[in-house]
Amino acid sequence: MHTEIMAVMNLTPDSFSDGGQIALDRDSILRAAGTRIEQGADWLDLGGESTRPGAAAVSVQEEADRVLPALEAIKSEFDVPCSLDTSTPSVMLQGASLGADMINDVRALQRPGALEAAAKTQLPVVLMHMQGTPDTMQDQPSYQDVEAEVLEFLRARIAACEAAGIHSDRIALDPGFGFGKTLDHNKTLFKGIGRLAERWPILVGVSRKRMIGEITGRPTSERDVGSAVAAALAASAGARWVRVHNVEATRDALAVMKNLGTL
Ligand code: 7PJ
């Protein structure tokens, strides 16, 4: 089972861990993309809307202005698959026409028009689970049975996708670590990655998240070792993609896992 490294490209001024690090001019974007590819990124995940807890909303125009020129520039210079971290139908459609390879939607295509737009692109989609909305999701996450509820939600979204004409072989799933979940919820879901991965391609995003901070006691800037270990564990459980900030650390972790461990 091969796991691909998906490098986060945050094209936002306010993302929680590296927002503002990529200046939004073409040269800076190409440099950031080139570095990630050299370091071993198999995919780039381009996002123009921060979904960190408490993040400010961005307009459709603002999001499009961040993501689409970056996508166009990257696709003109590099031969690398790019996913779009977006919930916005018009960004999906325009992104697809500029060569995007996958839609990664933390809202699982629930925005009005998103299912139809994604279906029209014929691209693969990642459906992520979130409880609540980004501004309040961490206030008081609550479940009777987190694994069952996440699965139930994702199954309903798969059914909605299929009804909209998105074939099941184009659907990947993501339990949505940190999106309306306590550390205990995240731990339970992490243990279930293997079971999910038996049936669907799974994307795992835990990089630099609060759960890594809670486990290690470290601030965002010091979570890359913990994140790389978690990525290696997710890979070993069968994740198809690990979505990460530090590509080099992840590549090393996966290489060691593959050569000395269980990958
Ligand atoms: C995720 C994501 C994730 C997927 C973000 C962050 C917040 N997409 N977009 N899964 N996280 N599919 O990077 O912490 O976990 S943005």
Image: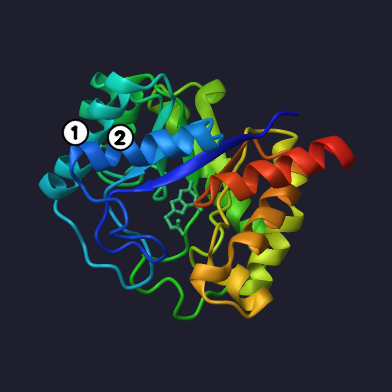
Residue 40 found in image quarter: top right
Q: Residues within 10 Å of mark 1 (few under 14, many from 20)?
A: some
Picture residue at 29% right of the left edge, 68% below the top: 55
Residue 91: x percent and y percent? 23, 36
Q: Quadrant of the N terminus?
A: top right
Picture residue at 53% right of the left edge, 30% below the top: 42
Question: Does 55 appear above or below 8?
Answer: below
Query: Tag 1, which secondary structure?
Result: helix
Q: Quadrant of the C terminus?
A: top right
Amino acid at pointer 1? Pro
* Earlier residue among tags 2 and 1: 2
Please state if 207 lies on the left or on the right of 184 as rendered.
Answer: left
Residue 169: x percent and y percent? 56, 21
| Res 99 visible | no
Please state if 186 lies on the left or on the right of 222 as rendered.
Answer: right
In this picture the colour scheme is: rainbow
Kindly check if marks 2 and 1 are in contact, taking CB atoms under 8 A apart as contact: no
Residue 168: x percent and y percent? 54, 25
Residue 78: x percent and y percent? 37, 22
Picture residue at 53% right of the left edge, 49% below the top: 244
User: Dot 2 corresponds to which residue?
Assistant: 30
Residue 117 found in image quarter: top left
Question: Does 57 appear above or below 41?
Answer: below
User: Dot 1 corresponds to which residue?
Assistant: 69
Please state if 92 lies on the left or on the right of 176 as rendered.
Answer: left
